[in-house]
Amino acid sequence: MKMKKEGTKFPVLTAYDYSMAKILDEAGIPLILIGDSAGMVFAGNENTLTVTLDEMRYHTRAVSKGSKNAFIVTDMPFLSYQVSIEDAKRNAGFLVQDGAEAVKLEGGTSIADTIKAIVDMGVPVMGHIGLTPQSIHAMGGYKIQGREKKQRKRLIDDARTVEDAGAFSIVLEGIPADLAKEITEKLSIQTIGIGAGPHCDGQVLVIHDVLGLYDNIKPKFVKRYVDLKKAISSAVNEYIDDVKRGRFPSKEHSF
């Protein structure tokens, strides 16, 4: 909130394991999101709908051990908060017990009561509207939201409702930049963009996309900062060659 008032942009990255969380934390990332994107980049599934609460709890425990300073937010996966408010509260509590400091829920007005209930039990909530991956079947796939006037108004209303329900921040995914700007200016809470243009208070990307480790899909909004897939392949090929030729292990690697 202080960064929003000062106009300082807020960087967010995902992590799913101890080692990566430690790297991001030591690099100074202020917020680590344990995304249900793990289902795709970590487990190889086609979408996020297969991710279970137990899997998110596992990733949360691992990341929390690697992060000492970053604020940790965990995605509540599909079916962990849609069935009932009591289920949602209990499952949010499990994630906090595993090390999360906040949880993220997808949806707007339809889940306002759920957001409020979780906040009222003392768990901070990050909202998520626009292109919500847990609703891709209802949306007809990964399509940009908010281009039509009616849809645009609904997203503005959703954003306001999420804020009124007590969320401390809200992810805006896959919406036009001008709409993200309007929502950001209307809200007092922080907006975190992904595929929503440059006007949000912060930005989030999946770490595997940033590092070039995942290329099954290549969204327009992703910026690849390094091609680690190529570097890793090169190292593995060198290792294979060393072993086959008897260069490894050498005397210095033996007891």
Image: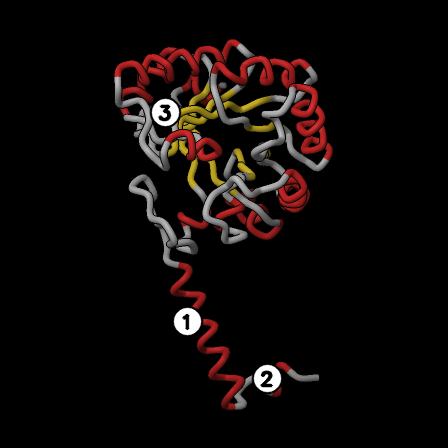
Q: Name the element at disc 2.
A: loop
Q: Which mark is residue 200?
A: 3
Front position in the image: 179 or 230: 179
Marks 1 and 3, the one that precedes in the sequence: 3
- Which amino acid type corresponds to the residue marked 2 in the rendered image? Pro
Q: Name the element at disc 1.
A: helix
Front position in the image: 208 or 45: 45
Q: Nearer the viewer, mark 1 or mark 2?
A: 1
Callout 1 touching callout 3 (CB < 8 Å): no
- The location of residue 78, given as percent across then percent down, is 56, 34
* Mark 1 → mark 2, Cα distance in angstroms: 18 Å
Report the residue marked by disc 2: 249
Say whether residue 9 is visible: no
* Mark 1 → mark 3, Cα distance in angstroms: 38 Å
- Which amino acid type corresponds to the residue marked 1 in the rendered image? Ser
Q: Is residue 75 above or below residue 165?
A: below
- The location of residue 190, given as percent across then percent down, is 45, 20
* Mark 3 → mark 2, Cα distance in angstroms: 51 Å
Say whether residue 84 is visible: yes
Callout 1 touching callout 2 (CB < 8 Å): no
Front position in the image: 166 or 137: 137
Name the residue located 54 percent from the left edge and 49 percent from the top edge: 23
- The location of residue 152, given as percent across then percent down, is 31, 17
Report the residue marked by disc 1: 234
Marks 3 and 2, the one that precedes in the sequence: 3
49 vs 87, left or right, is left
195 vs 10, left or right, is left
Q: How is the image coloured?
A: secondary structure
Count neighbours of disc 3 (C-alpha within 10 A) and say few if under 14, some if 14 to 19, many if 20 or more: many
- Which amino acid type corresponds to the residue marked 3 in the rendered image? Cys
Marks 1 and 2, the one that precedes in the sequence: 1
